[in-house]
């Protein structure tokens, strides 16, 4: 998978996962704002939708290709394993920072493997899958940034995701703003504050 790896000075690795049409450079400034001392593993999605990189296929706006999502989630998890081995970072200290499509596959990692991520920052995620049993996420902390008027990720879906993660044992913090699906400086600042209190 196309990616950037920057070595930091502490034991955490930020896994940066862009939104639809983005690339591995998009979230580097966000990563620096959250933890400028962490290792950074920023990945480009392998799926192309009309030339726009994504992490998994969708059938329509808001309708995921679930088979592809499951396949791509396993593929990403294996890639993180390999990147940890290749670069010598601590596989148990990976914190995802995902926006939109990237947040969705980060959430899917949590849904499939409680060892895939230590914690996660999800900006504007949707519920990745329904009718699946989540692993025990006790000890995992999740920050969700969401828009009260987001046309893509409705507040109801955000609340459903938060409740599903909590039911699996995760500690979830929800931050709301009124800027739709936009990633705002305010939610990034709140995410950084949350992260440094872990």
Image (tube, rainbow, N blue to C red):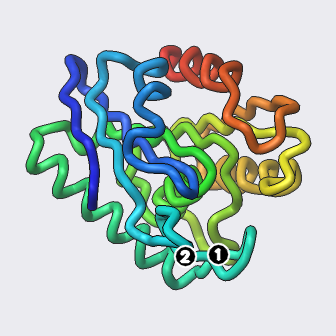
Find disc 2 in the rendering and name its residue: 57
140 to 57, vertically: above or below = above
Give whichever of 62, 84 is nearer the camera.
Answer: 62
Residue 152 picture location, percent across and down: 79, 56
Left or right, residue 154 beside residue 106: right
Residue 167 picture location, percent across and down: 68, 53
Q: Is mark 1 on a helix, strand or loop?
A: strand
Residue drawn at (67%, 51%), measured in percent from left and top? 125
Asked whether residue 136 is in view, the answer is: no
Left or right, residue 114 beside residue 164: left
Residue drawn at (24%, 19%), measured in percent from left and top? 10
Residue 38 lies in quadrant: top left
Q: How crowded is mark 1: few (under 14 residues within 10 Å), some or many (20 or more)?
A: some
Residue drawn at (66%, 82%), measured in percent from left and top? 59
Find disc 1 in the rendering and name its residue: 64
Q: Do the residues labelled 1 and 2 touch (CB within 8 Å)?
A: yes
Give whichever of 112, 50 is nearer the camera.
Answer: 50
Mark closer to the chain start, 1 or 2? 2
70 to 126, vertically: above or below = below
């Amino acid at each position: 998978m196309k990616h950037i790896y920057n070595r930091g000075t502490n034991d955490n690795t930020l896994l940066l996962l862009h939104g639809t049409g983005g690339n591995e450079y998009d979230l580097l400034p966000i990563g620096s704002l959250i933890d400028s001392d962490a290792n950074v593993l920023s990945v480009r999605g392998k799926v192309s939708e009309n030339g726009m990189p994504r992490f998994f296929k969708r059938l329509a706006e808001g309708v995921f290709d679930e088979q592809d999502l499951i396949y791509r989630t396993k593929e990403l998890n294996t890639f993180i394993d390999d990147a940890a081995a290749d670069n010598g970072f601590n596989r148990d200290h990976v914190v995802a920072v995902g926006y939109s499509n990237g947040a969705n596959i980060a959430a899917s990692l949590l849904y499939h493997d409680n060892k895939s991520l230590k914690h996660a920052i999800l900006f504007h995620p949707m519920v990745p899958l329904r009718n699946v049993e989540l692993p025990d996420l006790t000890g995992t902390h999740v920050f969700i940034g969401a828009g009260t008027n987001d046309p893509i990720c409705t507040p109801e879906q955000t609340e459903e995701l938060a409740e599903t993660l909590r039911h699996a044992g995760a500690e979830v913090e929800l931050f709301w703003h009124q800027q739709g699906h936009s990633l705002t400086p305010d939610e990034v600042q709140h995410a950084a504050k949350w992260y440094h209190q872990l």
